Image (cartoon, grey):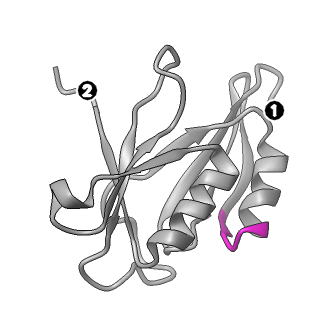
């Protein structure tokens, strides 16, 4: 036991965050606000037969993370088919680069971005030729 089964991304602007994650990663959302007692949208991140988990966007209840502050919490890393095109879409939809793309030799391309809500997210493209 102890496997991560759900994630929550804290957001200031729910519609902006839904657009960011929906357009870039293809996530879909279901309004669970009545159940949660606050703005809360369940996120389906892929097909049930694929590796991964689903989660939610929830209304932030305090100040957003400040630029340059150390990580406080978990960084979620999202698997993508094409790192470069995903990074371009992140920038197009208002995200920023936190740590540029780098090779995990023989395994993947990895990097970190900041979403529209100030959260750090990882981007991971498997590639056995990465070096």
Identify the element where label 1 is drawn.
Answer: loop
Quadrant where the C terminus lies?
top right
Q: Please tell me in which quadrant of the rendered image residue 66 appears.
A: bottom left
Which residue is painted at 80% across and 38% down in the image?
82
- Residue drawn at 60 percent across, 52 percent down: 22
Element at badge 2? loop
Of 128 and 39, the residue lying toward us: 39
Check residue 86 for magenta coloring. Answer: no
Residue at which label 1 appears: 131
**Is 125 placed above or below 111 here?**
above
The residue carrying pointer 2 sits among few (fewer than 14), some (14 to 19) or many (20 or more) residues within 10 Å by Cα, namely few
**Residue placed under numbered mark 2 in the picture:** 3
Query: Of callouts 2 and 1, which one flags the residue occurring earlier in the amino acid sequence?
Result: 2
Residue found at x 72% / y 68%: 93
Residue at x 50%, y 79% (from the top left corner): 68
Question: Residue 50 at what x, y percent from top left?
Answer: 52, 18
Query: How far apart are the alpha carbons under marks 2 and 1?
Result: 30 Å
């Amino acid at each position: 036991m102890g496997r991560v089964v759900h994630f929550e991304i804290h957001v200031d602007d729910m519609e902006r965050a839904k657009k960011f994650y929906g357009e870039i990663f293809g996530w879909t959302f279901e309004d669970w606000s009545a159940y949660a007692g606050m703005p809360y949208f369940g996120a389906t991140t892929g097909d049930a037969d694929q590796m991964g988990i689903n989660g939610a966007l929830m209304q932030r209840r305090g100040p957003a993370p400040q630029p340059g502050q150390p990580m406080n919490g978990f960084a979620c890393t999202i698997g993508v088919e094409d790192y470069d095109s995903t990074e371009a879409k992140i920038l197009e939809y208002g995200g920023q680069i936190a740590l540029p793309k780098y090779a995990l030799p023989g395994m993947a391309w990895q990097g970190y971005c900041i979403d529209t809500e100030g959260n750090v997210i990882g981007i991971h493209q498997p590639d056995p030729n990465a070096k």
